[in-house]
Amino acid sequence: MRKQIVAGNWKMNNDLKASKKLAIQVAKKVKKSNLKGTKVIIAPTFVNLERVVKATKNAKIKVAAQNMHFEESGAYTGEVSAQMLKSIGVKTVILGHSERREYFSETDEMLAKKVNSALVNKMNVIFCFGEVLEDRKSGNQEKVVESQIKNALFHLKAEAFKNIVLAYEPVWAIGTGETATPEQAQDMHAFIRQTLTNKYGEELAESVSILYGGSCKPGNAKEIFSKKDVDGGLIGGAALNADDFLAIVTAF
């Protein structure tokens, strides 16, 4: 049975005080809601990771990093390795986010190395991918998504996917004025699952959780999460408000 997951990506928001406050608020609300079967993850900035880990030590939420380097150590100023993250209690990392691809020129080849490093270090990966507006309007969305998945992940053995969660981001539906419908989300998630089936077989494909990352909010989460192949969400802006985030978490 696939895991239901809601992950909050805080991006470059919240100083230490705000991060601790939000983390504690989310932890308390999750505990009070007595959730069953839904995994909750929050991803603060690097500088606040350790303090948030400590603040949520006994909570029913996990803390993830927003990125990491593929090397173990070396002359990579400003970068962070998998071992560094593990040393402070972080065992999950978001890789391939659309903003990393767009603003920091991360390629599929680079992301394949990052995935390898994370898995070698026994970390869990939330792997992101998705098409931009131009791809959607030209009808190339499936080709783009298939290429991103194949280039970064299809060198892996089947057992590696026990530690990988996929996150589909329709970049064209984030801050563009365009809106992705629940049906469009389902269609792409079904395509992604079929792509996995073609490579690794149906049993593996049905075991991998696929999150939706396209402006998921309290008002649309329930309908999106009701779709057969949508297993949760990677939440951006709405994750910065504890009440909004919890409303999405409980949308299942």
Image: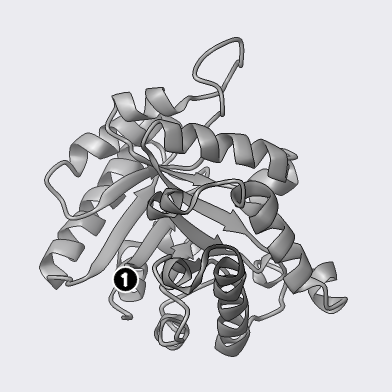
Of 109 and 50, nearer the camera is 109
Q: Is residue 33 left or right of residue 22?
A: left
User: Which of the 4 image quarters holds residue 38?
Assistant: bottom left
Rendering quarter of residue 241: bottom left
The residue located at (43%, 73%) in the rendering is: 206
- Residue drawn 30% across the image and 24% down it: 87
Q: Inspect the image, locate mark 1, and give the three-letter code of the amino acid beneath it.
A: Val
Label 1 sits on a secondary structure element that is: helix
* Among the 4 quarters of the image, the one containing residue 28: bottom left
Q: Is residue 39 above or below residue 51?
A: below
Residue 197: % across, % down: 55, 71
The one of 238 and 43 positioned closer to us in this rendering = 43
Give the answer, above or below, for where 55 lies relative to 181: above
On the rendered image, what quadrant is the N terminus found in? Answer: bottom left
Q: Which of 50 and 185 is in front in this view?
A: 185
Q: Residue at x 62, y 41 (%)?
A: 112
Name the quadrant of the C terminus: bottom left
Q: Nearer the viewer, residue 120 or 250?
A: 120
Q: Please state if 159 lies on the left or on the right of 12 as rendered.
A: left
Q: Position of residue 154 (x, y in %)?
A: 61, 52
- Kindly identify which residue carries mark 1: 249
